[in-house]
Image: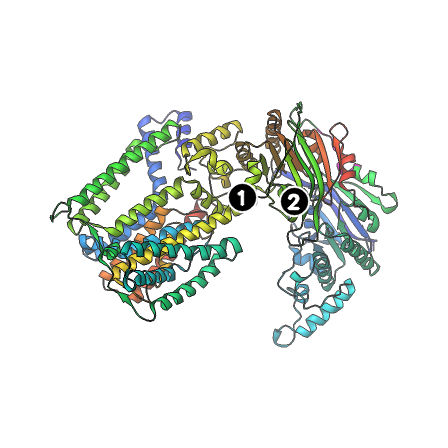
Amino acid sequence: MTTNILEMRSITKTFPGVKALSDVTLDVGRGTVHAICGENGAGKSTLMKVLSGVYPHGTYTGDIVFEDEVVEFKDIRDSEAKGIVIIHQELALSPYLSIAENIFLNNEQKGGLGLIDWNKTNHEAATLLARVGLKENPTTKIMDIGVGKQQLVEIAKALSKRVKLLILDEPTAALNDEDSDHLLDLILHLKEQGITSIIISHKLNEIKKVADTVTVIRDGQTIETIQKTDVTEERIIKDMVGRDLEHRYPDHTPNIGEEIFRVEDWTAHHPQDPTRVVVDKVNINVRAGEIVGIAGLMGAGRTEFAMSVFGHSYGSRISGKAFMRGQEIKTRTVSEAIGNGLAYATEDRKHYGLNLLEDIKRNIALASLDKLSSKGLVNDNEEYKVANGYRKSMNIKAPTVMAKTSKLSGGNQQKVVLSKWIYSDPDVLILDEPTRGIDVGAKYEIYAIINELAAQGKGVVVISSELPELLGICDRIYALSEGRITGQLPIEEANPESLLKLMTMEKPR
Amino acid sequence: MSSTQTPAAEETAAGGRINPPENKFTSWLSHLLADLGKNGIFLALLAVILFFTVVTDGILLRPQNISNLIVQNGYILVLAIGMVMIIIAGHIDLSVGSVAAFVGACSGVFAVSWGLPWWLAIIMSLAIGALVGMWQGFWIAYVGIPAFIVTLAGMLIFRGLALVVLGNANIGSFPTEYRALGNGFLNNVFGDLDLDPLTLIVAAVAVVALIVGQFRTRSGRAKYGQEVEPIVWFVAKLVLITVAIGFFAYALASYKGIPVTLIVLAVLVLIYGVIMNRSVFGRHVYAIGGNRHAAELSGIKTRKTDFLLFVNMGVLAALAGLIFTARLNLAGPKAGDGFELEAISAAFIGGAAVQGGVGTIGGAIIGGLIIGVLNNGMSILGLGIEWQQAVKGLVLLLAVAFDVFNKRRSGGK
């Protein structure tokens, strides 16, 4: 019997066109806490989905050895039966059911006649809650407890399945400091009881606190596995980002003018929980012709900041000032923001950017119908002309502008979204993950469009999870962490290490 | 994709073996097929008409019956116009039947009990419809309660209020001018002739206006370099429509002339057709129904648009109530019973999507006509109300199922 509870050997997983995991090896010692680090999209979640049977045996190559036995999971029930439980970032709890009902969902505690034994259910639940240190009545509904406590319920649920290996995917991303500390303590406490944990995280402080071993993954490959004693921030960061920046970015000669847009002390709170600060006194500015990046890890508040500025589309209790060319502007509604020269292209094209039922031309026209209409009537010939112009200039690959946007590829959909906002003729464009889900060729085209906008003297703000992308196209980069701007670097001084350091800088406690 | 002209034409150019006439024919054919797909609902109407013409030995298409068809279904068509707009925006309105009854009752009080002038009674009734719409629109748009709930409540509230206003009695004997809304005909301005000349003149003017309008649209599109359908098919369609209008006008002229209800309807279809096809407001409605978040992030005032839609529905429900009351010459407690279901059916048969974002005024009107022809045809056959209900339900189900099937086949989602 080896000391390893889990060995993943040479795991390779391909999606059409992409190699998500390439020859990944992972050894997890019994009774340890093993951290997996990597940038967004490095392949961490894919690896865990392979392990837990979300991607069944046969869709990947390589072997999974669990407790000295090669396992072939067909689905997540198979892996749970062996004692592997994964807790996803988005919790899988039903808000209208009680804590106890959630813990035993699909594992109901039955009495006679196959009916649910409520006394047993609630009693067992109470025992499990005591183990995770959650002082709540098992009959309380999930919606009535905070997200930190919900996380504990998920762990209690895992314990009810006699978990041997617990996988937590960014467990503290949505938690406040107190709840995070409690959760990390619990992980250590479970370790004493012999439960092995894998924790996916890019918060270096918490990794140092709980992990015995750290494995860094980059571009779908294992870079190295480090023992606790050898872990340093510098080493992990270097492992996470050490890739070369090829000529994936069009040449860009900045021609930067006067300041065009400035935000001062911008603060926004969570829409459902007005006590939680999501955007914390953010100050940024953009100059004419400048491409400014905002770097931040998932959950840092990037999108939340942009959307709260753009017509208060996110958050509650929003405060702060915005200035366009030195004049204070109000952005309380989207139309006010657009009227004052702002545009925001969303990170989520399908849900927030496009009307997929409509064609290209109607999507492009949507934010600027005033320009195309007189006396409330739209001139659809002009609309066609405008849209067709963008189809050609932006190289949108579609036979006509009457093609439905649902039929387009991600890159072409993104070009439609950009066309829509460029046609609204803003002074400042905020582009949120402008190349997410787009193939490499189309990315280059999008970068060229961004350069062109800057060359026209517009201010461009690019929010991105991909550091190489920000380093490749921006003139200056802000780092955002826990809703705060933790620093800004001119492009000459910016490199992945310096940025990641700022991006992971935590609030002084 | 295969039904659009461009790829076929390109292939031909590349291959170079197919000679021009065949190419013209294939493009003509592809247009015909594309149009058949788009106008499936129109064909369904023709099929229903044909079917009932045969089984009723031609009674369906007798002049008197054609006139009746319009007058009997006018209020459903008025409601269908408002309803399809609500459905496109992703809502529903279950209250329109009750609102029609309530407003009908109010108009009875105004025009009969209080003896107000007929025009004032009509204006006040429409204003009440607008107030009802504001009430429901407020809860839906600004408080955020789902339209299903608000209008379900409205269905009960306004049915109840209709009874309160009527005080457990019917109100009858409306002024002649008021009754014209449901029973009146525009005719005999040139004397009492076998064939009413005014009807024919109006039809001729309508045909000319249609042809001129269609040609202007076509040349406008061509000028902007947009693809236009082949001229043969374009002219053939105009000829078909002209024949249909001519036949329809001849039938009306040889009976009593143009029903006032038809005039009201024609005006509404024109106005709302323009609103939904050409206006900024119409674009906003489609955008909201297609993707509410994207619409909001494009600067569209979604709440205001929702509110206005329900105010509009309130006014149209009031108008439907007036037409119905005028036709019966009676404001009674059972008025408007089940109207909402027929209006909703009309919109869905006419191609509107349950999730919103899709639908047309023209489709809803044709959907309403299909229901009308079914009602009328089955009545002529002497089918009981129980079978009529069952058949209409089945037609609604099949129409929507056909639509779903069609979309799946064309690979949409």
Q: In this view, does A153 lie to the left or right of A399?
A: right
Viewer can see residue B213: yes
Q: Residue A287's quadrant in the figure?
A: top right
- Residue B24 in the image: x percent, y percent? 32, 30
> Pointer 2: what residue?
A304
Q: Which of A437 and A371 is in front in this view?
A: A371
Identity of the residue drawn at 28% across and 60% down: B111
Residue identified by numbered label 1: B294
Marks 2/1: CA–CA distance: 16 Å
Please give left or right for residue A9 compared with residue B390 in the image: right
User: Which portion, as a residue range, is magenta?
Assistant: A238-245
Any part of residue B413 in sight: no
Q: Do labels 2 and 1 share a chain?
A: no
Q: How crowded is mark 1: few (under 14 residues within 10 Å), some or many (20 or more)?
A: many
Residue B401's place in the image compared with A308, above or below, is below
Residue A103 on the magenta segment? no
The amino acid at mark 2 is Glu
